[in-house]
Amino acid sequence: MALTAGGGESRGAEQDGGGGGVELSRSSGNGGNGEERRMRREHMFDKVVTPSDVGKLNRLVVPKHFAERHILPRLLGGAARAACPGAVLRFEDGRGGGRAWAFRFSYWSSSQSYVMTKGWSAFVRDRRLAAGDTVSFCRTGARLFIDCRRRGTGIGASAPPTRLLAPAVMPQVVTLMPQRSTSSGETAPHVRCFRLFGVDLELIGAEPLSLDLQLALMRR
Amino acid sequence: MALTAGGGESRGAEQDGGGGGVELSRSSGNGGNGEERRMRREHMFDKVVTPSDVGKLNRLVVPKHFAERHILPRLLGGAARAACPGAVLRFEDGRGGGRAWAFRFSYWSSSQSYVMTKGWSAFVRDRRLAAGDTVSFCRTGARLFIDCRRRGTGIGASAPPTRLLAPAVMPQVVTLMPQRSTSSGETAPHVRCFRLFGVDLELIGAEPLSLDLQLALMRR
DNA sequence: AAACTTACCTGGCCC
DNA sequence: CGGGCCAGGTAAGTT
């Protein structure tokens, strides 16, 4: 996969803290098989978090185009939104260490928006995420990763006001739990466009691998 | 049964609006057999209701110690909490008149708490229950009763701001529906302690009769 | 379609 | 101070 800037300042090209295009060239020595080490980290999306995303609401609003393009088609074989009330997404920590985060993913029909709810605030606390920082979601095949970077990090930043609290390291390859992969009824074309930071981006050659989605019927 | 104050101000001894220690000395003339008339009303628990308990949430949070001590051991022979998702408790109106209230009793694992849901708001409306008022649950053998009293009623109240809307009368003894009594695998000792208003109370001689519990698997 | 009802989540607080 | 309890929100289904 590659990111191709389609217009405007190519701020999207700067997503390397946990973003697109980073090759897993270093082996962390545990867990990774040969194929996974060869695969690139495919960027999915970044979001500059709002005050609400890191505040008391305990939720991250997921841009609709991302949710509908990358998440929904792989949930329950693309079944109706309402049919996945308790989807839980697991993301490995982009800094490595074997840590993982589980976020509940759902749709709030009142606001017509997709959100990550349960589990999100734990990530915000742990990474000391603040408004203006950026969260970054990517994947290697079926494994999902989440990372973040401070506001101002990247090209064009005059002076990063805060630094990353931990150096970025390659993720440890650890199997965290048995994974239920959706038998992919993938039909999306391999060239896809979306907007990021007001820039039209094109995903080239994204292969139709299933995401690391785990559905738990959490109804009690 | 008797209530024995174990410490502190014995505010617990004032639960007579629908509380412990009231002898059914007057026969209401219908329904009660000799044994039931002889039995005392055994107090189970009171709760000073919160704004949420009487508000739009339509649920009463049941203190865990009460639920686990008095309700759960008699549900499904003490089976797991998760196994009784739709238990319905029937309470006769403590004021008499033959009226009864049915409340759905369930456990919300998300908040780790027991609640009465369906049916509760009808009681709140009918009795004009307000925050600060007290609901009182007691039983006579297998028959459950519910009553309430206004905030400020009881010893130490300088001036009751509101009066009871109806005078307390002895309950009519009416068989309301066929009752499924759990074949009691009762093992609890006859002297039990619990805390109420910060006061340690002791239940003496509470006999191991089954409660008027009706289980309905109401999950949709 | 608005009101009601259930279900679910989370922070505050207390033990 | 860590975990559990619960009060009070919010979301979504139901009627």
Image (cartoon, coloured by chain):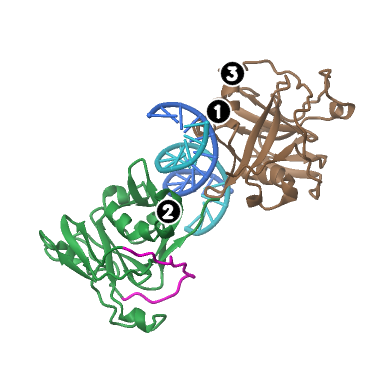
Chain colours: A green, B brown, C blue, D cyan
Tell me where the magenta segment starts and ends, as one range.
A170-187
Q: Tell me which secondary structure the magenta stretch mostly adopts.
A: loop
Determine whether B203 is above or below A51 in the image: above
Residue A138 falls in image quadrant: bottom left
Give the labeled residue for mark 3.
B160
Asked if the stretch drawn in magenta spans residue A3, the answer is no
Asked if the stretch drawn in magenta spans residue A177, the answer is yes
Report whether residue B126 is seen: yes
Query: Looking at numbered disc 2 in the image, what kind of residue is underneath it?
Result: Lys
Comparing B146 with B134, the one in front is B146
Quarter of the picture containing the C terminus of chain B is top right
Give the labeled residue for mark 2.
A118
Would residue A172 be found to the left or right of residue B96 on screen? left
Chain for disc number 2: A
In front of the other: label 3 or label 2? Answer: 2
Q: Residue A214, percent across and down?
A: 45, 62
Query: Looking at numbered disc 3 in the image, what kind of residue is underneath it?
Result: Pro
State the residue at coordinates (84%, 29%). Answer: B36
Q: Residue furthest right?
A: B34
Give the mark, 1 or 3, whose residue is nearer the N terminus: 1
Determine whether A41 is above or below A150 in the image: below
Mark 1 vs 2: CB contact within 8 A: no
